[in-house]
Image (tube, rainbow, N blue to C red):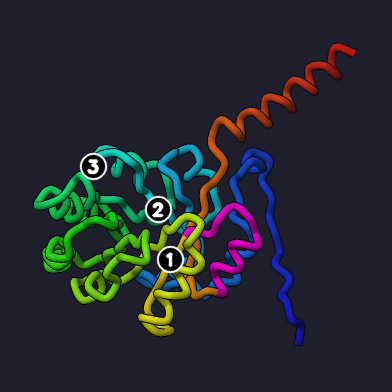
């Protein structure tokens, strides 16, 4: 029996610039959410990126007050399942609950709450939502058990340079079966280490629209120079 199956690939000329997730992410176990197995999540709200990316889902979290118009725009533009940021830091209280409920009704696969969110708000969101709550963990000081007891069904680990150690600590606390999503870092080696530490799925940050476009423009300039010759 072959160790690795051959995967036939059908190419598209117009989609050759697609953003591809690092293949190392496929080594993760994945998390089955609403009957879909998700291993990779792209961390972006750029609809052009999201419409041209092979990730399994998108983590639509951004550093501003959550807006349903933004959530709707993302869901309209991308075929990917969307995990929508609904606040929990500066945006709190009943506003977070209302945004979360509207995100579900618009078709979100899950809602992401920020690390500072009070646990009683997580409980209140859990009472009205059917989709999973992803509770963000950013520090060793976060009360992980309380987040889970309050209704968080997935932990979203984003600890910067401490992410791998943080994932290891969480995995020791919650056991082998509780789902963990974690940022994978900028290198293939860090992605693999994060998976080995216990992450079931990986969030990765794609190159920006500007970075991709600069490469395209450089190709166009070379083509123009060759044409002049």
Q: Which disc is residue 59 wearing?
A: 2
Instruction: Identify the residue under disc 3.
Output: 68
Q: How far apart are marks 3 and 1 (CA)?
A: 24 Å
Q: How far apart are marks 2 and 1 (CA)?
A: 10 Å
- Image quadrant holding the N terminus, namely bottom right
* Residue at point 41%, 42% (across, down): 45
Callout count: 3
Disc 1 crowd, CA 10 A, few/some/many (<14, 14-19, 20+)? many
* Residue at point 27%, 69% (across, down): 143
Q: Do the residues labelled 2 and 1 touch (CB within 8 Å)?
A: yes
User: Is 145 placed above or below 157 here?
Assistant: below
Q: Position of residue 200 (x, y in %)?
A: 48, 72
From the viewer's perspective, tell me whether residue 58 is left or right of residue 189: left
Instruction: Identify the residue under disc 1.
Output: 181
User: Is 105 placed above or below 91 here?
Assistant: below
Q: Which of marks 3 and 1 is in front?
A: 1
Q: Which disc is residue 171 wearing?
A: none
Image quadrant assignment for residue 180: bottom left
The span shown in magenta is: 183-196
Q: Which of marks 2 and 3 is nearer the N terminus?
A: 2
What secondary structure is found at the residue carrying circle 3?
helix
Q: Which of marks 2 and 1 is nearer the N terminus?
A: 2
């Amino acid at each position: 029996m072959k160790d690795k199956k051959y995967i036939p690939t059908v190419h598209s000329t117009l989609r050759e610039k697609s953003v591809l997730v690092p293949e190392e992410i496929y080594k993760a176990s994945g998390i089955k959410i609403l009957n879909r197995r998700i291993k990779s999540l792209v961390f972006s709200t750029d609809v052009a990126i999201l419409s041209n990316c092979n990730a399994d889902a998108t983590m639509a979290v951004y550093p501003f007050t959550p807006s349903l118009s933004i959530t709707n725009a993302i869901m309209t533009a991308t075929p990917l399942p969307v995990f929508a940021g609904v606040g929990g830091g500066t945006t709190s209280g009943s506003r977070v609950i209302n945004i979360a409920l509207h995100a579900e009704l618009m078709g979100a696969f899950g809602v992401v709450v920020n690390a500072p969110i009070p646990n009683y708000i997580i409980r209140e969101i859990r009472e009205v939502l059917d989709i999973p709550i992803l509770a963000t963990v950013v520090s060793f000081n976060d009360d992980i058990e309380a987040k889970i007891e309050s209704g968080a069904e997935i932990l979203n680990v984003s600890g910067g340079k401490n992410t791998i150690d943080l994932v290891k600590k969480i995995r020791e606390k919650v056991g082998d079966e509780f789902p963990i999503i974690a940022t994978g870092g900028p290198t293939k080696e860090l992605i693999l280490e994060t998976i080995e530490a216990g992450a079931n799925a990986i969030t990765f940050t794609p190159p920006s629209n500007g970075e991709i476009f600069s490469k395209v423009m450089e190709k166009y300039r070379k083509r123009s120079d060759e044409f002049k010759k």
